[in-house]
């Protein structure tokens, strides 16, 4: 009785650590403590699970500890080596592995069931099928998202004609087979059960194919919620309240974030999943070939920034690619020393994953109060002297406001053109990840500073020091 009591207390403390850790993740200032606390909760839950007496279970502690050590080493090495530009890919892989775990655990229940070794009632079998489906979709969907983000696969490479119709047929076939297997029980046989798992894996891969690159932050958030749901369903299979609580927390957080990001883009989730926005190469009105972008020299840009009263930095994926966040902070400090009020405008879907820009700037020790959300930034831009756009593109595209024919029309964007002057740091005139031309580059207030973002910011810092 004492052992059972202590195990339940450990599970309770672990669950509370999860909840409080998630609460601390809401701010970059406390995010590290939140991760540490949630990790402590997980370790406590693992120890409790290993201490729980299970009738008829063999002594497999060696396998468990070996797997923990191996996984810990892989995770530690990956976390230390991964570049900030590759963080979205890493998140996708972690999402996928969570789904893969659910698939393995559910299939491990299915095999003895069809061979007569165990019994499952209709509800239990339905839960196993649900875990197979959600976990399979999360696994292969996340792996394809990783391949897209890594540039291994382009959006149009695997897209088939009427692909959304294909996805609908696949979904109906998979769900229909799952219902049939649940209704017929063990008489269906392992072959059909395995076929259901394969169909779920194929559907996960297929449903991500039409989703354009610009929608990747939403997709990653959605897949994260699916991974949480697969963990929760697996918790139902094994009667683990801790897995159930942890899975529900992850699933709920991912779902809420997905909805918020869709709202930030002024699009429904269905539109994101079937719209194929991004990578289509669509052109925005007014970005035709007879327009010429006006350039600015590093010296002129430094002078404008140095003698301005206020400046707003708009970071994008280009900032991550150039690893320029610390140099950007250096420019920020030099301007602040001269009395310039410097802040940062953060678009909800800037980068390749939710909160990508927040993570980058937190790494450079940029104070969190200096980060403005979309609405705050648009209010502040009206009275701002200078805007520095570092690697952002689609989130500052005026076509969202004035071009009904643009794929991003209606999407809330940062209205940088409301400021007095705009400087865009960019390698070239190529469109952003969504494949859409940006008329901002030809705006009368805009000046282009071409080159690698880190190099350009370093030169700006040097020029500002000499003023």
Image: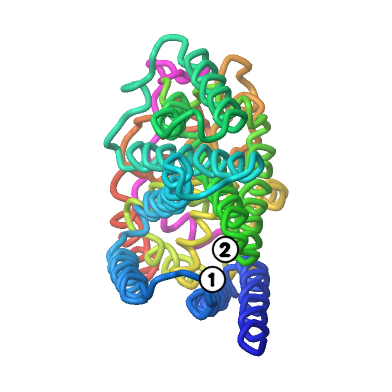
Q: Which residue is mark 2?
A: 342
Position above or below: 3 against 210: below
In the image, taking residue 411 as reference, residue 462 lies left or right, namely left
Q: Nearer the viewer, residue 45 or 167?
A: 45
Q: CA distance from mark 1 to mark 2?
A: 7 Å
Q: Are marks 1 and 2 in contact (CB under 8 Å)?
A: yes
410 sits to left or right of 155: right
Other residues around mark 2 within 10 Å, as few (<14) / some (14–19) / many (≥20): many
Q: Which quadrant: the C terminus?
A: bottom left
Residue 375 in the image: state x and y as whole percent.
71, 48
In the foreground, 17 or 396: 17
What residue is shown with label 1? 336
Quadrant assignment, res 2: bottom right
Q: Indicate which disc, 1 or 2, sits on the residue closer to the N terminus.
A: 1
Q: Quadrant of residue 10?
A: bottom right
Q: Which residues are magenta?
A: 281-308
- 306 versus 215 height, above or below: below
Which residue is drawn at the image coordinates 64% and 48% (left, top)?
A: 257
Tell me, yes or no, whether the highlighted magenta stretch contains residue 448: no
Q: Secondary structure at mark 2?
A: strand
Q: Is residue 128 left or right of residue 428?
A: right
Identify the image quadrant of the N terminus.
Answer: bottom right
């Amino acid at each position: 009785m004492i052992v059972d009591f202590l195990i339940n207390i450990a599970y309770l403390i672990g669950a509370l650590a999860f909840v409080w850790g998630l609460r601390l993740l809401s701010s970059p200032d406390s995010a590290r403590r939140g991760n540490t606390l949630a990790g402590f909760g997980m370790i406590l839950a693992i120890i409790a699970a290993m201490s729980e007496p299970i009738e008829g279970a063999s002594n497999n502690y060696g396998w468990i500890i070996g797997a923990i050590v191996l996984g810990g080493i892989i995770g530690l090495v990956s976390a230390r080596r991964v570049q900030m530009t590759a963080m979205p890919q890493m998140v996708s892989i972690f999402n996928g592995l969570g789904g893969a775990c659910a698939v393995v655990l559910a299939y491990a229940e299915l095999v003895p069931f069809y061979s007569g070794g165990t019994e499952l009632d209709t509800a239990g079998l339905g839960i196993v099928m649900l875990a197979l489906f959600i976990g399979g979709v999360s696994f292969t969907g996340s792996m394809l998202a990783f391949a897209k983000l890594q540039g291994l696969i382009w959006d149009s490479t695997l897209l088939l004609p009427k692909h959304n119709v294909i996805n609908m047929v696949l979904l109906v076939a998979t769900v229909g087979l799952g219902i049939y297997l649940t209704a017929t029980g063990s008489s269906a046989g392992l072959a059909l059960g395995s076929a259901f798992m394969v169909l779920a894996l194929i559907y996960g891969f297929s449903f991500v194919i039409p989703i354009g690159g610009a929608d990747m932050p939403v997709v990653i958030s959605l897949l994260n919620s699916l991974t949480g749901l697969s963990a929760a369903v697996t918790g139902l299979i094994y009667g683990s309240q801790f897995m159930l609580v942890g899975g529900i927390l992850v699933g709920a957080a991912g779902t809420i974030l997905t909805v918020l990001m869709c709202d930030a883009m002024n699009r429904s989730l269905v539109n994101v999943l079937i719209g194929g926005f991004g990578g289509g190469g669509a052109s925005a009105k007014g970005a035709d070939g007879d327009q010429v972008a006006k350039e600015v020299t590093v010296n002129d840009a430094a002078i404008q920034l140095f003698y301005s009263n206020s400046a707003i930095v708009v970071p994008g994926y280009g900032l991550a690619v150039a690893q320029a966040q610390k140099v950007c902070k250096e420019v920020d400090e030099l301007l602040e020393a001269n009395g310039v009020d410097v802040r940062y405008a953060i678009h909800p879907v800037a980068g390749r994953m939710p909160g990508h820009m927040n993570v980058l700037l937190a790494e450079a020790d940029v104070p969190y109060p200096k980060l403005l959300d979309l609405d705050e930034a648009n209010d502040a831009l009206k009275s701002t002297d200078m805007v520095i756009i570092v690697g952002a593109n689609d989130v500052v595209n005026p076509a969202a406001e004035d071009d009904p024919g643009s794929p991003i029309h209606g999407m809330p964007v940062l209205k940088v053109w409301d400021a007095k002057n705009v400087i865009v740091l960019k390698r070239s005139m190529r469109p952003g990840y969504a494949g859409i031309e940006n008329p901002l580059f030809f705006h009368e207030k805009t000046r282009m500073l071409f080159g690698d973002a880190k190099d350009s910011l370093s030169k700006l810092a040097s020029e500002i020091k000499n003023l």
